[in-house]
Amino acid sequence: MKQFTSVHDVADVETLVKEALNLKSNPYSDKQLGENKTLGLVFLNPSLRTRLSTQKAAINLGMSVMVMNMDKDGWALETQDGVVMNGTTVEHIREAAAVMGQYCDILGLRSFPKLKDREEDYSEDFFNKFVSYCGVPVVSLESATRHPLQSLADLVTIKETWKGEAKPKVVLAWAPHVKALPQAVPNSFSEWMCKAQELGMVDFTIAQPEGFELHEGFTPGAKISHDIDEALAGADYVYVKNWSSYSSYGQVLPYPEGWMMNNEKLKLTNDAKVMHCLPVRRDLELSAEILDGPNSLVIHEAGNRLWAAQAVLKDLLQNLS
Ligand code: CP
């Protein structure tokens, strides 16, 4: 791989999943690979799991790591070309990204959408400019429209825990929330599950209320339902996540009743394992009884963020020119 920004950067998804599980069994097998190599992690938004798991993955590979909280510690960045910078922006992304590329062999970037202008967010303007100006391989730590390290960890978790003969039924289930959240996690999860379905690894359904459909570019081959109870029937994995409306972009719409996953809903499934990327709002998005119960995979899933990140960094290190 030359970069890791979506499932489309991965030549062989099944091999990358296997690599993550191999590294879980033998975390320090490639300690020499990252010697004298530096990973820079650039955050424009908060993070717990992505920050710590990616740092730890790099350490396991023998890399040095530098973290920059760009939103708090960096200069205010200008992204547009041809503007006279006589306002609040202090440094252009052309120089800032290029300079970071001078200090690091691989860079990671987290840049959330602003949820004000759909076309701007979905153009990934900031992210793409950073990639093109920094001059080194980039790992997405979550962009405006995708969170591929999370999705890889999710697929690793399903592959690792599924013991059935037939392929598992995986349901991405919309959940209530009081804020407008990005579509990056569900877009990305759907994209990876659609790829896994194509490879015969899973059977994939998305359940969401009317008005919360994801952009169809992220859902090729997914079964779509507007009836949560119907979608949950026979599910082996339920991936719970809120996302705001793509069609009514950035708006906080009133949330419908009956969409929070709880033990009553679990009875409709095939004793499904329940996943969530975290952070999660208890008893709003997902019931505390599920989070604290035997069907929850959320901590296991977060643990696998480490092995997903390590598999990606290993691949990028092996392909450094
Ligand atoms: N799931 C996830 O990306 O967590 P953080 O936002 O805490 O990194």
Image: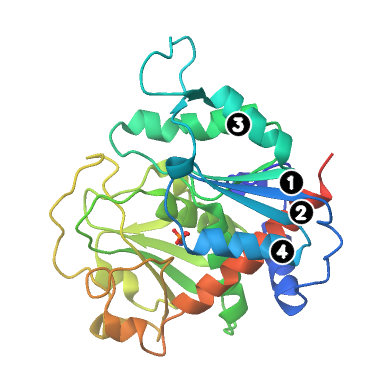
Q: Which residue is mark 3?
A: 97
Quadrant of the image occupied by residue 175: bottom left
Q: Pick whichever of labels 4 and 3 is earlier in the sequence.
A: 4
Amino acid type indicated by mark 3: Ala
Disc 4: which residue: 59
Q: Which kind of residue does numbered mark 4 sit on?
A: Ile
What x and y, as percent, mark residue 253?
16, 50
Sequence-wise, the earlier of marks 1 and 4 is 1
Circle 2: is it few (<14), some (14-19), or many (20+) Cα within 10 Å?
some
- The residue lying furthest to the bottom in this view is 294
Asked if the residue under mark 3 is in contact with the one under mark 2, i.e. CB atoms within 8 Å, the reply is no
Q: Secondary structure at mark 3?
A: helix
Question: Is residue 16 or residue 228 the one in the foreground?
Answer: 16
Mark-to-mark CA distance, 4 and 3:
23 Å
Label 1, on which residue? 1
**CB-based contact (under 8 Å), mark 2 and mark 1:** yes
Q: Residue at x 74, y 62 (%)?
A: 15
Q: Nearer the viewer, residue 76 or 49?
A: 76
Position above or below: 195 against 56: above
Q: Position of residue 22 (x, y in %)?
A: 75, 73
How far apart in space, not on screen, are marks 1 and 4 (Cα)? Answer: 20 Å
Query: Residue 304 occupies which quadrant of the picture?
Result: bottom right
Identify residue type, mark 2.
Asp
- Secondary structure of the residue carrying numbered label 4: helix
Q: Nearer the viewer, mark 4 or mark 2?
A: 4
Q: Which residue position holds label 2?
A: 315
Q: Amino acid at mark 1?
A: Met
Query: Depth-wise, is mark 2 or mark 3 nearer the camera?
Result: 3
Mark 1 or 4, which is nearer the eye?
A: 4
Disc 2 element? helix
Residue 312 appears in the picture as rendered: yes
Query: Secondary structure under badge 1?
Result: loop
